[in-house]
Each structure stands twice: as structure tokens, then as C-alpha cells.
Amino acid sequence: MGGFLGFLAVIAAIVVYAISLYNRLVSLRNRVKNGFAQIDVQLTRRHDLIPNLVEAVKGYMAHERGTLEDVVNARNAAVTGLKAAAADPTDPEAMKALSKAEGQLSGALGRLFALAEAYPDLKANENMMQFQEELSTTENKVAFARQAFNDAVMNFNNAVESFPSSVVAGMFSFQQAEFLEIEGPEKREVPKVSFS
């Protein structure tokens, strides 16, 4: 009888430990989702600034229609990518698609700002200076939010891969999350834009 109770105690301890590992994985996954929610807020702000920016430059850069269309198309692709990633921030494919779309948007904005340099009236436009400041501030907030998100992803992935939590992760289909890399390491700086 004593051996049987001891056996039950060991089984109960294992079950309690497995439950604590499961709860830790859920908590870490929720931190990933929360971290992405902060990115969502900042990228949405960035995306919302772009139509106003395009409107501000449209009158000055009428013959640069292709560049303006590239910015609008890249913005729309980024909005779509953000919605897909927000649905499940732990989906690696959605995160890769978002990273690619945001990189294309950054490239299109960089080309737009480079062209804007050729328009003295546009460079002196108060709206353009305000958009530049807001976009720069937003880019910094995105960078901070991305770092916090990637830290949460690293903690979650470590738990998914580490023994014994990897056993529980496998039993309940916890998959590794993808880091968010908006641009390659060589392009991580905020675009340098001068309207003065």
C-alpha cells in the first residue's frame, strides 16, 4: 500500500510539474502576443502617416507618379502583412511576410525622400518637415517595440526548445515563433532625410 501511495505521489508531482511547464509556455506565448501588439500600434501609426505624406508631396512631384504609386502599393502590402501577423504573432510565415513587406515599404519611402531632395519648395514645406519628424519618431518607436518583441520571442523559443519544457511543448503543439526583422542589418538605421 505504501509503495502504491508513493507511486501516486510521484505521478501527481510529475503532473503538477507538467502543468507548470504548460502554464509557463502559455505565459511566454502571451508575452510574444503582447510584444507584437506594441509593434502593431506603431506600424499602424506609420501606415496611417503615409497617405498624408503622399498627399503632401503629390502637388510638388506630379511627374514622379511611379514613385508615389510604389509608396502607396508598398504601404498597402505592409498593412495586409500586419493584419496577417497580428492574427497570430507566433506564425513564422506571417512574420516573414510582414518583415518583407515592411522592408519594401522602407525602401519605397527612402526613394521618395531621396527624390524630395530635388524639390526646394517641398523641402521647405512645413507639412513635410512635420511628416519627417513624425515618421522618424515612429520609426524609433517601432525599433524599440521590435526589440521587446524579439526578446519575448527568444524567451518563448528557449522554453519551446529546452528540456523538459520541450516535451510539453511538443505534446501541445507549441511551435517556435519568428523574430521580426524589418530590414537587413545593413539598413537598420532610420532613413536620413533632410528638408532644410
Image (cartoon, rainbow, N blue to C red):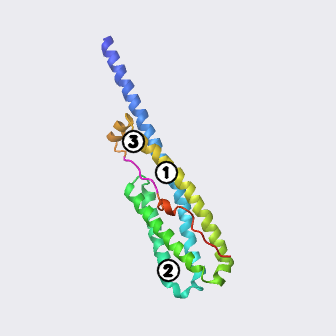
Q: Residue at coordinates 44% horizontally, 42% vertically from top-left?
A: 26
Q: Earlier in the sequence, mark 1 or mark 3?
A: 1
Label 3 SS: helix
**C-alpha separation, residue under disc 2 versus residue under disc 1:** 32 Å
Near-viewer residue (22 or 58): 58
Amino acid type assigned to the residue bearing label 1 in the image: Asn
Above or below for 27 versus 142: above
Q: Which residues are magenta?
A: 175-180
Query: Mark on residue 160?
Result: 3
Q: Residue at x 50, y 54 (%)?
A: 36
Q: Position of residue 42 (x, y in %)?
A: 56, 61
Which label sits in the foreground, 3 or 2?
2
Which residue in the protein does label 1 denote? 150
**Residue 114's disc number:** none
Residue at figure coordinates x 61%, y 83% from the top left: 119
What residue type is disc 3 on? Val
Q: Position of residue 96 (x, y in %)?
A: 40, 59
* Spatial CA span between label 3 and label 2: 44 Å
Q: Amino acid at mark 2?
A: Thr
Residue 169 on the magenta segment: no
| Residue 123 in picture, x, y percent from top left | 65, 79
Q: Which residue is mark 2?
A: 67
